[in-house]
Every structure is written in C-alpha cells, then in structure tokens.
Amino acid sequence: MGSTYNIVTNLIIFVPLVVIFAVLPFITRKDIVFGINIPAAQWSNDYFRKLRRVYSLLSAGIGAVLMGASVLASVMLGEDLAVVYMQVIIWSAILIYFLLYVFFWIKVKKYKAQASWKISEKRISAADTNVSGGRRALSNAWYLVYPLLIGVTLYSAVKLYGLAPNMIPMRFDLQGNPIVYSQKSMKLIYEVVGMQAFLALLFFGINIVLKMAKKSVDPADPEASSVQSDAFRYRWSIFLFITGLLMLLIFTVVMVSIFVRLPMWAMLYVPMAASAAILVYAVVLAIMTGQSGSRIKIEGKRAESTEIIRDDDAFWKLGMFYYNKEDPAVFVERRFSPGWTTNWARWQSWLIVFGILAMVAVSLYFSF
C-alpha cells in the first residue's frame, strides 16, 4: 500500500506540472512569445512555431524523466527518505523549467532585435480598467463562508476534545499505524484553526487583487480584449474560491482525525482526491482561458495586428519580473503564464511579501 500511495502522489503532483509547462507557450497572448512583445500576426510564423514545439517536447521529456526518478525513489527508498527525495526533485524541476524558459526568452529577444517590425503609435490609457463593464471577480460576500467553516471546525474540536485520549496520534504510516504521538492540548486546535484563518485571509486577499490588478487591454481591439480579460478574471476567481474552500475542508478533516480515529482511506485519500481535483481544475482552466482570456472566443474580434502594439519589454526583467517606476499599478498580468504578478518598483509589493513571510513565521512559531 505504501508504494502505491507514493506512486499515486507522484502522479498527482508531476502530471499536472508537466502538462502545464508543456502547453504554456501555446496559451499565451498572441502578441507575446516567451515573455517578449511581438506583432500578433507573427505568432504563427515558422520560427516561433518551431520554438514552441521544441520547448513543449523538452518540457515533456524533462518532466517525464524527473517523474520517473521520483516514482522509482518512492518504490525503492523508505517512506521518509522518499518524501525528501520527491521534494528535491520538485524544486529541481522548477529550477530546470525556469532555466529552459530563460534560454528560449534569449532566443526570442535576439530574433526580435534582428527583425524590422514596426511599433504602433496606438496607445490606451492604463486608467481604462473596465472597458467592458463585466464582472471581475466573485463578490467578497462569498468569502463569509470561510469564517463560518472555521467556526464549525473550532466548535467541533472543542466538543470532541473531551473524548480524545491524553496521548493523541499525530502521524501514521501508510498502513494506518500511529508512529508519532503528542500530548493532548488546546494548542493542537489553535494550530489547525490558525492555519485555516491564514488560508482564508490569503484567498480573500487574492480575490481583492483580482479586482485591483491592472487590466491588459489590446489597443488594437480594446472592446473584445476587455471582455476576454473580465471573463478570464471571473473564472479564475471562482477557481480560487473553490480551491480555498477545499483546503479549509482538508484542515477540518485533519482536525476531526486528531480526536476521532477516522478510517485510513479517509485520512489518506480524501486530501489526495481534493488536491488532485484542484490541480486538474487549474490545468483545464488555464488551457481553456489562456493568458488574459486570449483563448476565450469573442464574436467580432478584429484581425491580428502586423505591428507591435505595446513594446514594454524593458520593464520585464527576463520577461518575468515587472519593474516600472512610472506605472502606479501594484498588480499586473504575467507574461508567460495565466495569472498575476506584482510591480516590484512599488513599495506595496514588498510590503505584501514581508507581510506573508511574517504570517508564515508566526504560524511556524506557534507550531513548535
């Protein structure tokens, strides 16, 4: 059972990771190739088609090799060592994918420098953030479900506290046998509920970011691109709310398992199934919407431009990190994947990072 569980865990982690990295070049906006602005009409030229194909094949091959190594380790090594080895491989995969992206970013940058593409004089105001008038994100009222669930978790734990033995099993092997015990205390409850509160605040904050982030509008077709952007944000907002809800429910299951011995399948496979659902949902949504909603079909969309509509490559370091002192926006859309990033020239970006790190540090402090 242990080997099977580890193999399934590896597949749940690596398959979505490999798929999303392999398809990334195909779901970006057509005026961006590997983080570099190009004329949208050039997106399908032979050179860029070859680059995307080669990147996809390399990504899939690298991912398959790393996944195979992780699965092999999970079968041959002990449980604890296999987990450590898998984490090392995951971080190695992320680093390798980053370096692979940088390699292709350099190639596109050189190609653009030698091309004679015209830069359009069309501009659109950054303040024009709601051309379509569409919904950007779920209402914050939806997030009232989070504190309600946390309250139910806390109430249930307090009620079950008296039923728990003095020594509570905290960790189990893959056969369901307890291997680590802890003295019963309210601290266990506060840790789980505190983690739920942290996640609730995090996902609530992300929903606010979706509303605040600067909209990427195509000056050549502002109406259609604005509709796509709003639909893109709204669909990802729903995904994030569901993801947060599932994660809170996982911690509720963890809380109940501290005081009531649940069936082994519930402790192992319920969190696994929830995690798998989240990852599959993310991959499918990314492929269906594309970057900035570029894959969402809009009637009446104009022809692709033969000029570079906006040339802001200088503000994107490695085509990935945005640094623009003249842009008042704190949150902007990414260049190479669906989602949002921060303007590192704004002090608010650093405040957010340090705030999250502080919350994590506090959480870790109370865990020991």
Image (tube, grey):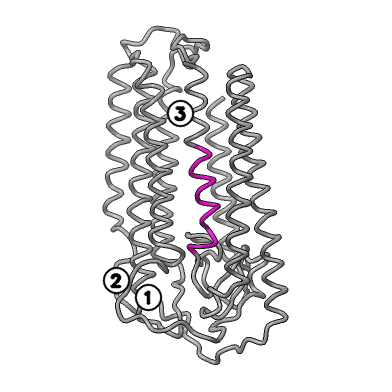
Say what secondary structure mark 2 lies in.
loop
The picture places residue 81, in percent across and down from the top left corner, at 64, 21
Q: Residue at x 35, y 29 (%)?
A: 252
- Residue at 28 percent across and 27 percent down: it is 155
In front here: 325 or 177?
A: 177
Q: In this figure, which residue is indicated by the disc labeled 1? A: 226
| Contact? badges 1 and 3 (CB < 8 Å) | no
Horizontal side, residue 249 vs residue 316: left or right? left
Left or right side of 5 for 345: right
Queried whether the magenta region covers residue 202, the answer comes back as no
Q: Are marks 1 and 2 in contact (CB under 8 Å)?
A: yes
Sequence-wise first label, 2 or 3: 2
Identify whether 284 is placed above or below 104: above
Q: Amino acid at mark 1?
A: Ser
- For the record, the magenta segment spans 13-27
Q: Pick out the residue farthest to the bottom.
A: 121
Judging from the image, what secondary structure is the residue with disc 1 in?
helix
